[in-house]
Amino acid sequence: MATSKTSVLGHAILLFSALTGAQNTDVPTFYPRSPPAYPAPIGSGFGLPGWSEAYSKAQAIVAQMTIAEKVNLTSGVGWQGEQCVGNTGSVPRLGIRGLCLQDSPLGIRFGQYSSAFPAGVTIASTWDTNLAYRRGFAMGTEHRGKGVDIQLGPVSGPLGRFPEGGRNWEGGGSDPYLSGVGLASAVQGIQDAGVIACAKHYIANEQEHFRQRGESVIPVDEAISSNVDDRAMHEVFAWPFADAVRAGVGSIMCSYNQINNSYGCQNSELLNGILKNELGFPGFVMSDWQAQHAGVATALAGLGKELDCPDRIHQM
Ligand SMILES: *[C@@H]1O[C@H](CO)[C@@H](O)[C@H](O)[C@H]1NC(C)=O
Ligand SMILES: *[C@@H]1O[C@H](CO)[C@@H](O)[C@H](O)[C@H]1NC(C)=O
């Protein structure tokens, strides 16, 4: 009796597999996963000018905050607002106002009388770091003039792994060295104008198709995964970000895609491991809009600030 039941079940499974193609030999056997990198390192200014002083001030004020106030400070909302594309909450009790974030790597996205600056790849083609700096400074000045605190740029991801990548032109081209020099010059220019730069999209954000959950055509409702080995990660994709960190970039935006099947905004190896422990990034990691897919797990993996837009959450 038991045998016959088993064999009926076995046949049912085989039939199901045949019908659904579950035994398809195209299923990849290479399924990389990201190694865990915990805990998130305690932030430090690493003795860098400006940073250590800022850390001391921040630690003193954060020590006075309630949980609700900390959540306010590390959360942002909004989409296509007038002055800002998103805002963080404020802490009125301690006199801390919310921050105004605005797109883009090429100048102000939402707003009137703003300039369209040359694309990153155009600037990189000049091999002129001074010009790259001056473009950054001009963009930063315009953002500052509009009351923006964080300019969501410059870009070095995508690098151009796919010729059809929709945003390849926004960054400094496919050469990581050139892209890194361009990224660093832009960061310095933007920040010298008094605005925090945000180097993005960290990382391996190489294609627009299926970059977000909900865009996928396959039944699994997850964003695409960029699977990258350790050497290519360090020598190609992370390289420009290392230059941005050395240039003192204040924030880095994690990307929509997964890397090695772990979301960019909760991949501990990339945030805690490579970005903070290896590169010594002292600033904060913020999510792209709706790129955060867990709560506490993202913070433990190294995310510092999440950004969401409530009106679109309801559509998902
Ligand atoms: C991704 O997976 C590859 C292959 O297993 C591994 O070499 C690499 O270190 C992983 N990188 C990250 C960031 O998870
Ligand atoms: C959170 O931020 C909002 C918007 O800036 C503000 O109105 C509110 O008072 C803040 N809440 C706390 C607990 O500080």
Image (cartoon, helix red, strand yellow):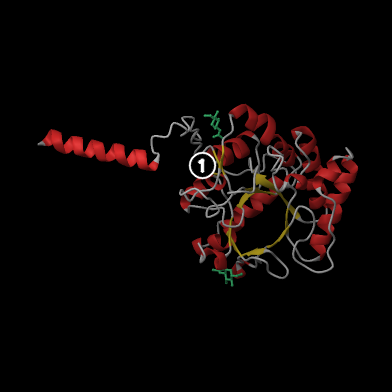
- The picture places residue 147, in percent across and down from the top left corner, at 77, 66
Q: Quadrant of the N terminus?
A: top left
The yes-or-no answer for disc 1 within 8 Å of ligand 1 is yes
- The picture places residue 64, in percent across and down from the top left corner, at 55, 60
Please say if 197 is above or below 231: below
Q: Secondary structure at mark 1?
A: strand
Q: Can see residue 121?
A: yes
Residue position marked by numbered label 1 in the rendering:
262
Please say if 302 is above or below 116: above
Front one among 218 and 11: 11
Q: What residue is drawn where x is 66% and y is 54%?
A: 57
Specify the amino acid type for callout 1. Ser
Taking the image as shown, residue 93 lies to the left or right of residue 68, namely right
Q: Residues within 10 Å of mark 1 (few under 14, many from 20)?
A: many
Residue 259: quadrant of the picture: top right
- The picture places residue 268, in percent across and down from the top left corner, at 53, 40
Taking the image as shown, residue 79 lies to the left or right of residue 138, namely left
- The picture places residue 8, in percent across and down from the top left corner, at 20, 38
